[in-house]
Amino acid sequence: MFRRWQVLHALRPFVIVWIAYLVASVALWALLDAAGYIAWTERTPKYRWAPISVLLIGVPAVAMLGAALALGNTLGQLKLARGDTRARGQAPWGSRDASWTRLGWCTVAITVVGGSIWIWSVANDPSNDPRFGLVLIWLVPGLVFAAVNAAQEELRFRLVPLTTLGVAVGDEQAIWMTSTVFGLAHWSGATPAGPLGAIFNTLVGAWFAKSILETRGVAWAWAMHAASNLLLFVVLVLTAR
């Protein structure tokens, strides 16, 4: 019983930061609904409102960060720093380690290649009418979307949860628990969606979390995440009706 109470007490910060996030989210979306913003997004192509939405979603993420800092966590403990981008990390499917300089750039390269194949398939789909000129027009908002969405998702799905949860259950369990939440959050409204999207994003989230813990910073997680977001934005523009 005493051990159980210790675990529950250790989980208290994790619960508090998520309550802060949820309260801020409910208040924000109530205001946006009253202002007609949500109704506007329902009749507008997603690429037009996605850059605005990620800026707005950043508000509850900042509330979560504020709660974590109020509980006594420092920015260093939350890994809200560049970190050692050349730190050694264990490569997947093996026991050998490698520099995160290599692991990070390899991940970005794989993302770009995979995303380019995705864009090519979208452009060659007869049901689509891709407009590459529109991609150039929306390039700056796309970069904002990629950078801000990566930052706010790393903050609310990894930086704060990993720190507050890791104290209670350990880093390894925290990686998979936070990554599962990240995957389930992409079940609907994401690309890909459904079970495949949830599994894919769970694995991606675990890789990002691994980079944060091994480099003790968010630089690589943010860079890898932002690269995938930019390619996603291009697809949103190309498939817009």
Image: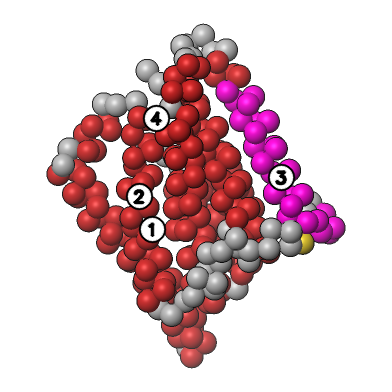
* Residue 111 lies in the magenta-colored region: yes
Gap between marks 4 and 3, in whole Å? 27 Å
* Nearer the camera: disc 3 or disc 1: 3
Classify residue 55 as left or right of residue 239: left
Which residue does the numbered mark 3 point to in the structure image?
105
Marked residue nearer the N-terminal end (4 or 3): 4
Could you tell me if the residues under marks 1 and 2 are in contact, i.e. CB atoms within 8 Å? yes
Q: Within 10 Å of the Cα at label 2, are there few (<14), some (14-19), or many (20+) other Cα atoms?
A: some
One can see residue 66 in this view? yes
Marked residue nearer the N-terminal end (4 or 2): 4
Gap between marks 4 and 2, in whole Å? 16 Å
Residue 227 higher or lower than 29, as above or below: above
Residue 22 higher or lower than 78, as above or below: above
Any mark on residue 57, and which? 2
Could you tell me if the residues under marks 4 and 1 are in contact, i.e. CB atoms within 8 Å? no
Gap between marks 4 and 1, in whole Å? 22 Å
Q: Residue at x 58, y 40 (%)?
A: 227
Please, what is the three-letter code of the amino acid marked with disc 4? Tyr
One can see residue 175 in this view? no
Any mark on residue 181, and which? none
Please, what is the three-letter code of the amino acid marked with disc 2? Ile
